[in-house]
Image: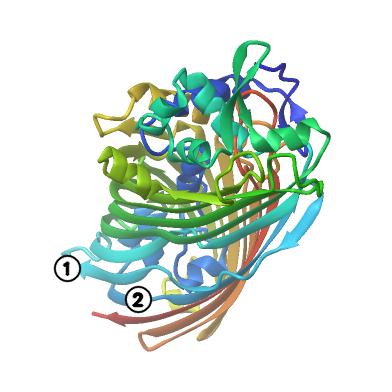
Amino acid sequence: MKNLSSFFLGPAIKRSRSMKYLISALSLFFSLSLFAQLPEDALRMSWTTPSGTARQQAIGGAMGSLGGEISAAYVNPAGIGMYKTSEFVLSPGFRFQKDFSNYRGTQTTSNSANNFNIGTSGFVFGLATKDPSNTGNLSLSVNRSANFASHIHYQGQNDYSSFSEQYVEEFANSGMSIDQALNSNSISYGTRMALYTYLVDTATVNGATNVIGQPEKVLSAHGILNQLNNSDIKGGITEIGISIAGSTHDKWFYGGTLGIPVVTYIRDLTFTESDASGVVNNDFATATYTEHYKATGAGVNLKLGVIYKPSQEWRLGAAVHTPTWYSFTDNLSATMSANTENYTTSPQPIEVSSTFFDQANNTSNGLRYDMFSPWRMLISGSYIFGGGVVDVKKQKGFITFDAEYVTTNSTRYATVDQSADPNYYKGVNDVIKHFYKGTFDVKLGGELKFNTIAARLGVSYFTNPYRDASLKANKLFLSGGLGYRNKGIFVDLTYIQGFTKDVNFPYRLADKANTYATLKENVGTVLLTVGFKFP
């Protein structure tokens, strides 16, 4: 293994402790039969920005202590206990975005990913009680807990590494011959396709057999590779919530939500690498890898919360969300095309698909596994202007603040299929533990009421989930909206502008520093909520 002086390249950072765990896990990736969960998969499920009603989103998503809102079911279900009547809510929305990237000095703007979204919608049922200061309420709702839609596109020139090196590493560490690897389900699709197309091969040097990648010949001759990554991503998490909440003497409010999230994640990926030197006899011209990946699953979680009103003006809240226990099924199909010029006598390019290996080895295309998402803990405070007035219609507004801690690095995978190596998941879990850190999310919002009209503003900020500070990532959302309430009917309209920074790795190597792209995503969302109160 080559000497490692850094963890990542372009931009480069010092080697961190997490590198040792990443190398360990990458070496275990080779033992997985068909697919591999990477650290990014865990982050996708934990670093989320849930939707809500237009009112809740207009105040930055802060709903940990305010209550009296159906979106409280997904933040602090104790807020459902503040209802005095029943209610029906519908929250359609539209989301549009632009993605920007920088890969090895080349900046790219990708196409927009526009789609409809659903905020918190459903019913709240007020249950009759003998004492009006003691309530008992039931809520049935649905919410978009995460929206994965994006278009990641970046390109640049690389004089340091090739995407073929990941296949070189896996094959070299397997200890197999080429024929054995081509017929082994313990070797990934990518490596088998690279061997089949001669993108990866063996060569005898000074009497010793070495594994080579054809693009590495370009790099060894001080050449440059053009690289292009294009990913279209769809899907999200839609969560059904069943909430029960109540209150005691209009002072203590408590509640719980049973959450049932349903997940769909679809990624269509194309990665192309080509020789930028213009030399036509160096055994490599171009190679393209395409992949269609789909993960589907469902889970269950529990959200518990309490709100205390020390006075009519103040409200204090606390909530905890247990990890979600997900059951997933992954399916993947891939193709690879490689033009190795005069390296072989076969007509160029050579193309092969993953189905070729499935049919030849009589294997099924699918992997089942479990995942446990992070814990979430929240504290909140609200101040009600004119809270001493019993009639809520005469209250002048409020200001509210939430602070949430997410144990991002506690995400865990577990095997279900007997064919999967449990040591692989242990390696991935170790990477997650040391690669990520817990995050703090803060949300601040307020509302001013003018008879039947209300004006709202909010801001929320999600901190960097990466343990290594050289990886820059965060999320910032600014929001504002208007609301109308009169005679049991309410209509709210909100606009949210989001700014996200993140990183993306086109491939991961264990024997040298990795390169990555920096990403920026600008997301605008228009959300409308229409509701009706009834006895």
Which amino acid is tagged 2?
Val
Q: Residue furthest front?
A: 345
CA gap, disc 2 to disc 1? Answer: 21 Å
185 is higher (above) or lower (below) than 154: above
Which residue in the rendered view is the most extreme toward the top? 207
72 or 268: which is nearer to us?
Answer: 268
Picture coordinates of residue 522, whole percent (x, y):
66, 64
Residue on which disc 1 sits: 128
Please tell me which residue lies in front, 445 or 356: 356
Identify which amino acid the numbered label 1 is placed on. Answer: Ala
Quadrant of residue 377 within the rendered picture: top left
- Left or right, 157 with respect to 516, comes to right
Residue density around tag 1, few if under 14, some if 14–19, many if 20 or more, within 10 Å: few
Identify whether 117 is placed above or below 324. Answer: below
Quadrant of the drawing holding the N terminus: top right
Is residue 273 in view?
yes
Tell me the SS state at disc 1: loop
**Disc 2 or disc 1, which is closer to the eye?**
2
Identify the secondary structure beneath mark 2.
strand
The total of numbered circles placed on residues is: 2
**Where residue 360 sits in the image (x, y, percent)?**
30, 41
For disc 2, the marked residue is 89
Q: Residue at x 50, y 73 (%)?
A: 115
